[in-house]
Image (cartoon, helix red, strand yellow):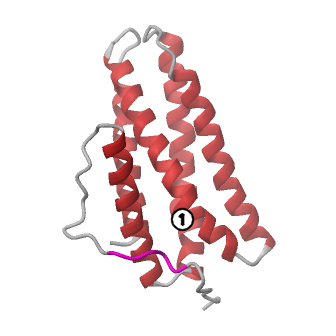
Amino acid sequence: MSVLETIKSEHREVTELFDQVEASEPGDERLRELAGQIAQKLSLHTSIEERLFYSELRDRVEETDEQVDMFEAYTEHAVAKNLLEMISSNRKADEKFKAELQVLGESVKHHIKEEESTVFDLAHEYLDKEELDEMGEAWERSKARALRAAGGPAKSTRKKAVRGTISGSRKKTRR
């Protein structure tokens, strides 16, 4: 499976969690549970994405505006990480807590929209299908390892694992 399909799938999962946040009332303890799920999913997602996907794409883009697009994606991740720190404290699920979760949700949804257009376009331009598939396989292995290490479910969405690494030495030129 292509890394782009994996990323989209994880985007849908976290978007659903943010939709549940919006439907919840301040004071609802479910907000704390949702915040925990969001923090776990986003932390893992941003870590793997930056290491496996962004770094490869960042090294390949050629134009100044493309480089800016990649650094913007990194910056949006940094903003999300800062907002995640705000909601990670063990406090009441009050109005302020819900507001912080909603701001995080708005920021992440904006990032998803831009990433699935601008960054995915760059990926199609600079990475071939085999590389995207290899990155998808590497993503699943990395995610499974991280979940096992955290004591969570490590079940992969893949039917079978493919051995190998991402071929970082290939450089696809513009089509």
- In magenta stretch: residue 166: yes
**Which part of the image, by quadrant, shows the N terminus?**
bottom left
**Which part of the image, by quadrant, shows the C terminus?**
bottom right
Residue highlighted by disc 1? 53
Q: Position of residue 7 (x, y in %)?
A: 42, 59
- In magenta stretch: residue 172: no
Residue that sits furthest to the right in the current view: 64
Q: Residue at x 62, y 86 (%)?
A: 171
Up-down: is 125 above or below 47? Answer: below
Q: Residue at x 47, y 9 (%)?
A: 91
> Over which residues does the magenta segment extend?
163-167
Q: Position of residue 73 (x, y in %)?
A: 64, 54
* Kind of residue at badge 1: Phe
Nearer to the camera, 65 or 88: 88
Query: Mostly what secondary structure, the magenta segment?
Result: loop
Q: Position of residue 41 (x, y in %)?
A: 40, 41
Q: Residue at x 46, y 49 (%)?
A: 45
